[in-house]
Image (cartoon, grey):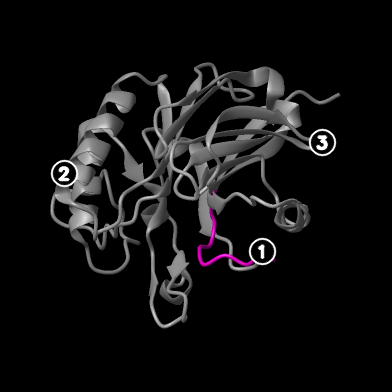
């Protein structure tokens, strides 16, 4: 048996123009990845597209805004059970990952910001809660949560570990409630990363940096590592969060 790693990333805005797409594909060729969660796809409709190296799925409802989806490496194509577009903020990839007995549901989300109306946030989390009740046994929630979970508080050790970061926001409170209800753990907090390097978003002028992109799962022992990609040659104001899942394959 030999060990192999599978890399799952969150979040990445998808390139709308052909020029930006070429730039994105070149940047991706320099990193390890297998499954990418996409936010801010900004494409109308719902589609599955076959590209040279990957399968693209996306769903969008508002012209020029929002939209979510996935990019999945071609070698995993036969393992895909279904793509499911719930809304322009939530999409699901049901997939049978190599060497896992039970199927996975990977949920890509793009949460409303702190500035959105409370009613908008309520609808989003109500919808996400329903989705989480209908998943496969193994679950991963990835994407732009637009909130900060902060550091661990009393009784939260199953949700946040000792490497939580920053001050919790109101959206962060919603995230914690979701995690408790669905038995999820925010894996960014389970692996040690220099606090100066934990940020995943920066303001356009570079003056503010926060950790608002996360990977959460109900199978935390199956993740070997979670880290932030500081080197990615594509002009975006988010940095990707990468989870590494190790599995065994038969020697040939």
Q: How far apart are labels 3 and 1 at the CA level?
A: 20 Å
Position of residue 227 measured from the top left corner of the image (x, y, whole percent): 52, 57
| Image quadrant where one finds the C terminus | top right
The residue that label 2 is drawn on is 119
The residue that label 1 is drawn on is 234
Q: How far apart are labels 3 and 2 at the CA level?
A: 42 Å
Looking at the rendering, the stretch of residues picked out in magenta corresponds to 232-242
The first of marks 1 and 2 along the sequence is 2
Residue, far right: 252
- Judged from the image, the secondary structure of the residue bearing numbered disc 1 is loop
Q: Quadrant of residue 2?
A: top right
Query: Looking at this view, is 239 or 194 the one in front?
Result: 239
Taking the spot 18% from the left edge, 40% from the top edge, the residue there is 122
Question: In this rendering, would 212 be left or right of 96?
Answer: left
Q: Are marks 3 and 1 in contact (CB under 8 Å)?
A: no
The mark found on residue 52 in the picture is: 3
């Amino acid at each position: 048996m030999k060990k192999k790693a599978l890399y799952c990333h969150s979040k990445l805005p998808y390139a709308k123009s052909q020029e930006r797409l070429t730039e994105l594909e070149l940047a991706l060729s320099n990193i390890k990845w297998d499954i990418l969660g996409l936010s801010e796809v900004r494409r109308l409709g719902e589609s599955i597209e076959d590209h040279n190296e990957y399968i693209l799925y996306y769903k969008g409802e508002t012209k020029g805004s929002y939209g979510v989806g996935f990019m999945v490496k071609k070698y995993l194509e036969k393992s895909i059970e279904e793509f499911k577009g719930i809304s322009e903020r939530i999409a699901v990839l049901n997939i049978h990952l190599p060497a896992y007995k039970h199927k996975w549901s990977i949920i890509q989300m793009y949460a409303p910001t702190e500035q959105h109306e409370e009613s908008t946030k309520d609808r989003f989390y109500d919808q996400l809660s329903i989705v989480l009740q209908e998943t496969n046994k193994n679950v991963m929630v990835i994407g732009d949560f637009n909130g900060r979970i902060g550091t661990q508080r009393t009784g939260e050790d199953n949700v946040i570990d000792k490497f939580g970061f920053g001050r919790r926001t109101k959206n962060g409170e919603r995230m914690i409630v979701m995690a408790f209800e669905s038995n999820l753990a925010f894996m960014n907090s389970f692996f040690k990363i220099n606090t100066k390097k934990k940020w995943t978003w920066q303001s356009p002028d570079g003056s503010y940096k926060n950790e608002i992109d996360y990977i959460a799962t109900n199978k935390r022992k199956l993740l070997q590592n979670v880290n932030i990609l500081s080197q990615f040659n594509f002009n975006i104001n988010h940095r990707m969060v990468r989870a590494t899942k190790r599995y065994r394959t038969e020697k040939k």
